[in-house]
Amino acid sequence: MYLIWICKLVYAIMCLFMTFRLNGLSFLIDIPPYKEPLDWNTRMKIAAGAAKGLEYLHDKADPPVIYRDLKSSNILLGEGYHPKLSDFGLAKLGPVGDKTHVSTRVMGTYGYCAPEYAMTGQLTVKSDVYSFGVVFLELITGRKAIDVTRPAGEQNLVLWALPLFKDRRKFPKMVDPLLQGCYPMRGLYQALAVAAMCLQEQAATRPLIGEVVTALSYLASQSYDPNATAVQNARICSSTQGVREDKGLLGCRFANEHVVHSPHHNSSEFSQRHQEKKEVSMRIDVGRTRSSPRNLNNGLVREEVVTEAKVWGENLTEKEDKSAWY
């Protein structure tokens, strides 16, 4: 009798696991054209939920935990596409005290590993942020991290995306074609900005996962009218036609900044922050001859994206607080 009970329990666990596994994120990326694709809002909600799971491991667990093998196949989707992180077999306790990293044997999945971890075996929470950037890019583009069926220059998702990050006129080419234009152009710019910062080559220039959660929580809270999206996208695209090709997300500041701002960019708080960013830009321009232009530009991009993320999050929190009073 006891053996029968054990068998039933194991069977129930296997059925539950298979239910989540068959609804895993990896099964919804690069799907055939005849299947219903994920809409833009659902993709942002999945990304925000996965980032919150990672935030718990990094910021709330004591000691902190480094996931080490974040990939789309390890993100299971429950009811309502609620994401759950699975398979903690490679997880490591994070650095404690004065330590900045954990040295360990390089393990993980090709295409998702952060470059500094793959080269040195030095693991930090920023290594997970890089892996999350790959997963987020998969959600945006509908492409796999590694896809040997594609042409030689497109098999590695990150290597394919890096040149496109530098030219905002090419951003629409990066979005999943199965969306058929049903996405907000401003939301696409903001999402790609977050992905680009997560995928910075230097770990120090990547945002913390908490900053990523702030930005994605804002994106996930936004909704759009598919019928009006095409018109709005056309207007925003036309406003960026004069942008130079080198004004992208990597290596330089944003051009035409109104394109990537939240709807609350006319607020006095935003104006103050915008002025602060201009002052930072002027200080960097003055000191450009004394420092590496590439490093300065990358640092400024990170500062602007993080500032944007905080503004999005604060506006969202303020909106929720006001609604709670009514």
Image (cartoon, grey):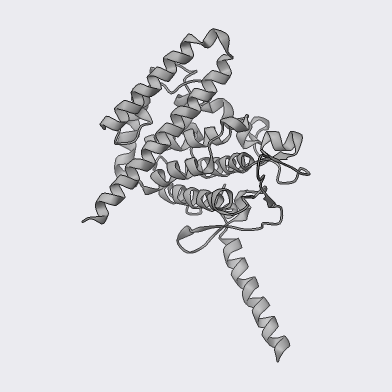
Q: Vertical placement of 168 versus 316: above or below?
A: above
Specify the farthest residue to the top. 289
Q: Identify the image quadrant of residue 87.
A: bottom right
Relative to 225, does residue 8 appear above or below in the rendering? below
Where does residue 304 sit, x and y in percent of width and height? 44, 28
Q: Residue at x 59, y 52 (%)?
A: 26
Q: Position of residue 299 (x, y in %)?
A: 52, 24
Q: Residue furthest front?
A: 97
Let me know if residue 109 appears in the view: yes
Q: Is residue 288 left or right of residue 218?
A: right
Looking at the image, residue 56 sits to the left or right of residue 80; the answer is right
Please name the residue shown 54% across and 23% down the image: 298
Residue sitting at 37 percent across and 23 percent down?
276
Quarter of the figure with the N terminus: bottom right
Could you tell whether 153 is left or right of 42 in the image? right
x and y, in percent, of residue 35 in the image: 51, 54
Q: Quadrant of residue 109?
A: top right
Answer yes or no: is residue 235 visible: no
| Left or right position of 307 against 76 | left
Q: Nearer the viewer, residue 125 or 257?
A: 125
* Residue closest to the far bottom: 1
From this viewpoint, which residue is outermost toward the right?
105
Q: Quadrant of the C terminus?
A: bottom left
Number of marks present in the image shown:
0
97 and 204: which is toward the camera? 97
Q: Position of residue 131 (x, y in %)?
A: 61, 42
Q: Residue at x 29, y 47 (%)?
A: 319
